[in-house]
Amino acid sequence: MPNPKRRHSQQRSAKRRTHYKASETTLSIDSTTGETHVRHRAHVSEGKLYYKGKVVAEKAPSRA
């Protein structure tokens, strides 16, 4: 397995890392509920789980 003979400088490592940037998450507005949510993720609104504007799951009633 090859190993480097000399240590890489901090500047060389920093040049390589300049391409790693934090990006903002894309938000969408659900057509059914009108809530803002992260794209391609299910979201909860009024106890129901929505994905692509459709109800995927409902919260079970609590047992008292």
Image (cartoon, helix red, strand yellow):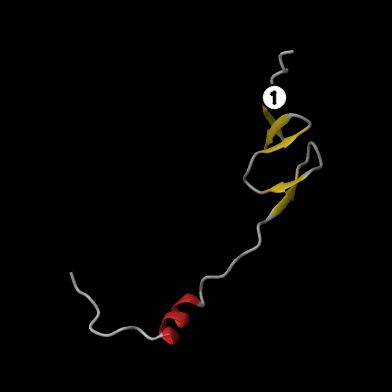
Identified at 56% across, 70% down, the residue is: 21
Residue 46: name its quadrant. Answer: top right
Please state the horizontal and vertical placement of residue 49, each as a whole percent of the image: 69, 32
Please state the horizontal and vertical placement of residue 5, each as a whole percent of the image: 23, 83
Identified at 62% across, 46% down, the residue is: 40
Please state the horizontal and vertical placement of residue 39, each as a whole percent of the image: 66, 49
Viewer-proximal residue among 63 and 33: 63
Local SS, label 1: strand
Residue type, label 1: Glu
Q: Is residue 15 left or right of residue 24?
A: left
Q: Is residue 19 above or below residue 43?
A: below
Q: Is residue 61 above or below residue 46?
A: above
Query: Which quadrant of the figure contains the N terminus?
Result: bottom left
Q: Is residue 45 above or below residue 10?
A: above
Q: Residue furthest top?
A: 64
Q: Is residue 6 left or right of residue 38?
A: left
Residue, disc 1 = 58
